[in-house]
Each structure stands twice: as structure tokens, then as C-alpha cells.
Image (tube, grey):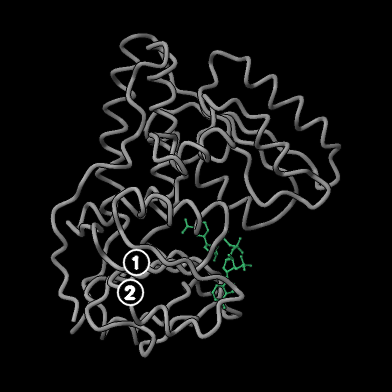
Amino acid sequence: MVAKIIDGKQVSAGIRLECKARVAKLAARGIVPGLAVILVGSSPASAVYVRNKIRACADVGIRSLRYDFPDNVEPDLVIDLVEELNRRTDVHGILVQLPLPPQLPVTRVLRTISADKDVDGFHLYNVGGLVLGDTVFPPCTPYGVMKLLEHEGISVEGKNVVVVGASNIVGKPMALMLMQRDATVCICHAKTRDLAQFTILADILVVADGQPNLILPQMVRTGAVVIDVGINRLPDGRLVGDVDFEGVRQKASYLTPVPGGVGPMTVTMLLGNTVSLAERSQDGGRAPRPEVRSDAAPMTAAVS
Ligand code: NAP
């Protein structure tokens, strides 16, 4: 078996076209969606992510406002800015690029963002909504994974899904979204003993960890769907995921590449969430929130 490679760039391009059309509809009513992006510190990786997000906003007609702070900024300055952005009617979404430098209280900063402008879905209110199975602004990376599965017609209902990684921004919301779609979910983390005994049971394996070659072919069930969220830069400069791509490709039914798989989807879901927030701001909160529950066609992948 050789896996079908899921082209995140192509799926992403289709969703961006839809975003453009929605932005044009808003423009006809005199509304330009606005996204505020706050970057604290000098991490080169964060700077690249922020640049990509701002470029993507421009591509679909979202106005972005970028705010930069040094590593040693006083937390109150960041909090004050978030509070000011909460009040501005031309700002529909607020994003604080993570990770923050250690002296900044990440929970306090994220909770200061109004739940109605919480484009990343990290506010306690939106996290709670996800836990309860309510519709929320879904965190962009796991939301992008759901869209990739949906696009390929891979239903998760009743499937064994193993999520490797239990972070607040990827692993946990991923697991919750999969549960909402009636998957049987197992979450693995750094203290999981014998990771392979769990991954080998997965019909769908989602890996969000941050270690190259964490997942080897012998850890994957023949015919499994493998989604590689990890992004790692090797000493020779190459970007790779957490999965042994060439090895697992010979065994899985579907596989996402790095780069070009989940990464483009994350940015695209951010654009979609920003447009949804702008639409909702005009409709007094009545416009529908992004749909996490929509059901995909039955899973077509052969799982032995
Ligand atoms: P993180 O906060 O560092 O979380 C990593 C998770 O992996 C933790 O839950 C950790 O467990 C778990 N873990 C560590 N070693 C493990 C092991 N040997 N077996 C099983 N689990 C293990 O990272 P993150 O923010 O979730 O990101 C994960 C990866 O995804 C990174 O490579 C990041 O760059 C990438 N990422 C990609 C995108 C994208 O758009 N493609 C977006 C976000 C993140 P503990 O909880 O026990 O420590």
C-alpha cells in the first residue's frame, strides 16, 4: 500500500477562495474584517508565522494590524493593548502569537481577549464550549485537521483515533473535536508508556508532538490515516514533521506531508474564523459560528 498524500495547500486554496467571496459580501456592506496580531519577543519562528498570517490576510482582503513588543515587555502593556483592541469596532479578531516569553502570564493574556474576538479559540469560554460540545470558534490547527479529513471523505465516526500530544493548542482540542464527531479517542503524551501499543490500534493517527521520526512504520497500522501536525527544523535546514514520511507512506492509506499538509490549513482556518467574527459582529451575534460537527462521507480508507 502507498498512501495518498493529502495536499493541504490545495484544500486550503479552495477555502481561501470561499473566504474571499465572504469578504467581498462584507465589503458590499462597507465592512472590512480586521485582525490584530500581537507578537512578543524575538523568536524567529514566531516572526515567520506572524509574517505568513499577515500575508494570508492581505490575500483574502482582511485588514491586519500588527503590534510588536520586546521580550522584556511589562505584562500590563500587553494586557492594556488587548483591552483597547477589545473595544475597537474595526477589529474583529485578536491573536496573540504563542509561545509568550516566560514572564508573561499566558492564561491572563488569553483570558483578556474578548470571547467574541477570540479568533484562535483559546479563551476559557470557547474552550468550555468545545468541552461541552457546543459550537465555538475552533482552534485553527485542529479545525484545519478536521477540514482535511472532511475534504478527503474520511469519516471519524466510530473510528479508533489516537492523538499523540496533549497540548492546549493542538492535542486537547483535537481530541475534543474528534469526540464531538463520535470517534473513540485516545490521547498520548510524554509520560505515555510504550507509545507504539496505542498508535498501532489507530484507524486515524494524529501526531502533534515536535520530534522528528517519533512515529516509525512499525508503529502504524496498515491502511491507517496519518495526520502529521509536527513541524521540526533539522540541522541541515529542512522542515520535517514527527512522522517518518517515506517509511509510513508505504503503510498508511492517507498521509499529510510537512510542509504542505496541516500548516497551510492552520493559517486558512484563522482567515475563516476572522471572517466569521466580522460577519457575527454585524448580525448581533446571530450569524452562524464555524461548523465543527458537519459530517463527512463514510471513511473510504482501507483499514486492515
Ligand atoms: P507542545 O506544547 O510542546 O506539546 C507537545 C505534546 O507532545 C505534549 O502534550 C507532550 O506531552 C507530548 N509529548 C512529548 N513527548 C512525547 C512522546 N514521546 N510521546 C507522546 N507524546 C509526547 O507542542 P504543540 O504546540 O502542541 O505543537 C506540537 C507540534 O506541532 C510542534 O512540532 C509544533 O511546531 C507543531 N505545530 C504545528 C502547527 C501547524 O500548523 N502545522 C500548529 C501548531 C503546532 P506532555 O503534555 O506530557 O508534556
Task: Give the residue number, with chain letter if any, for mark 2.
Answer: 202
**Which quarter of the frame holds ligand 1?**
bottom right
Name the one closer to the observer, 159 or 148.
159
**How far from the left and from the top, in percent, is residue 100?**
72, 49
> What residue is rendered at 37% in x and 62% in y?
260
Q: In which quarter of the image is the N terminus?
A: bottom left
Around disc 1, counting alpha carbons within 10 Å, would you say few (fewer than 14), some (14 to 19), or many (20 or more)? many
Q: Which amino acid does label 1 sit on?
A: Val
**What residue is pinned by disc 1?**
161
Residue at 44 percent of width and 40 percent of height = 132
Q: What element carries label 2?
A: loop
**Can residue 56 be seen in the rendering of this structure?**
no
Q: Do the residues labelled 1 and 2 touch (CB within 8 Å)?
A: yes
Q: Where is residue 209 in the image (x, y as percent from the top left)?
A: 53, 69
Q: Quadrant of residue 130?
A: top left
Q: Which of marks 1 and 2 is nearer the N terminus?
A: 1
61 is higher (above) or lower (below) than 233 = above
